[in-house]
Amino acid sequence: MAELFTQPEDLAALRRPLTPEQADKLPHLHRLLLGYYGTPPERKPWDPLTQLIYSLLSGRTKTPASHQVMRELERAFPGAGPGHWEPVRDAPVAELERAIQIVTFPEQKAPRLKALLEQISVRTGALSLDFLHRYRTEKIRDWLEQFEGVGAQVSAAVVNFSTLRRRALCVDANHLRVIQRLCVVPRADAATTEERLMRLVPETWDAEMLDQHHSLVKIHAQTLCSFEQPKCEPCPLLKLCPTGERNLAELKLR
Ligand code: SF4
């Protein structure tokens, strides 16, 4: 987190107040998505450790499979579940890998998850992240990002979606794709994009609102703005989207 906004243009941008048009960029996007998809289902937040496990396993995996794998963990390791992940930590990697077959890269995620749970136990003396409630948001994210496989996307998900409920925007692959196609901020990696987007987030948006915003963008990414073939014609964001205009112009030329 500390290395973001080190480019001179970023530092200059940080000092400049937003124009009314810039300030309305994300609210406008949000209103259009809300009008098209309706209010996303409300999240029932997990404790921070359960959210961390989910976020680690769900990378590059469809949402239904990500939810399914949490049920698989509880089924494969009796006694495992929110607040009690010791049976998963203590399981052999091969069994863990079998239990999470439904997600992408289980051979990488299984040893990483086991190592993460073991390291948390050693460092904190217990398998729980509830102590993070006492930390400032930046400190929580730095603490989480010290572990292998935990980057800005996962730490943002943990602080925003879990019972920590802090302000952060989880820019996952879906979110990044939509934002880049819309050219909302200059193209960059997910962590820098989050920093730039957060500058456009109204101060009145609390953690729940940021969660809803992320959910709407994700629904859009998985419905119309898909990776392979975005459906631009019916898209509620078409008038704002240089990529959509280009796609439709190319279609007309064929
Ligand atoms: S117009 Fe096309 S590329 Fe742009 S946001 Fe909509 S679906 Fe995605």
Image (spheres, helix red, strand yellow):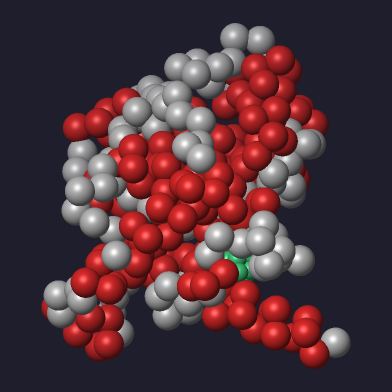
Residue 193: x and y in percent read: 41, 68
The answer to whether residue 210 is above or below residue 194 is above
Q: Report whether residue 130 is seen.
A: yes
The answer to whether residue 77 is above or below residue 205 is above
Which residue occupies the extreme top position in the image? 79
Q: Which is nearer the eye, 122 or 221?
A: 221
Residue depicted at x 55% and y 80%? 242
Residue depicted at x 69% and y 44%? 62
Residue depicted at x 37% and y 60%? 28
Q: Splitting the image into four quadrants, where does ligand 1 fall?
A: bottom right
Residue 198: x and y in percent read: 30, 61
Q: Which is nearer the eye, 16 or 100?
A: 16
Image quadrant for the N terminus? bottom left
Image quadrant for the C terminus? bottom right
Residue depicted at x 66% and y 61%? 234
Instruction: Tell me the quarter of the picture where residue 212 sits.
Output: top left
Residue 185: x and y in percent read: 40, 75
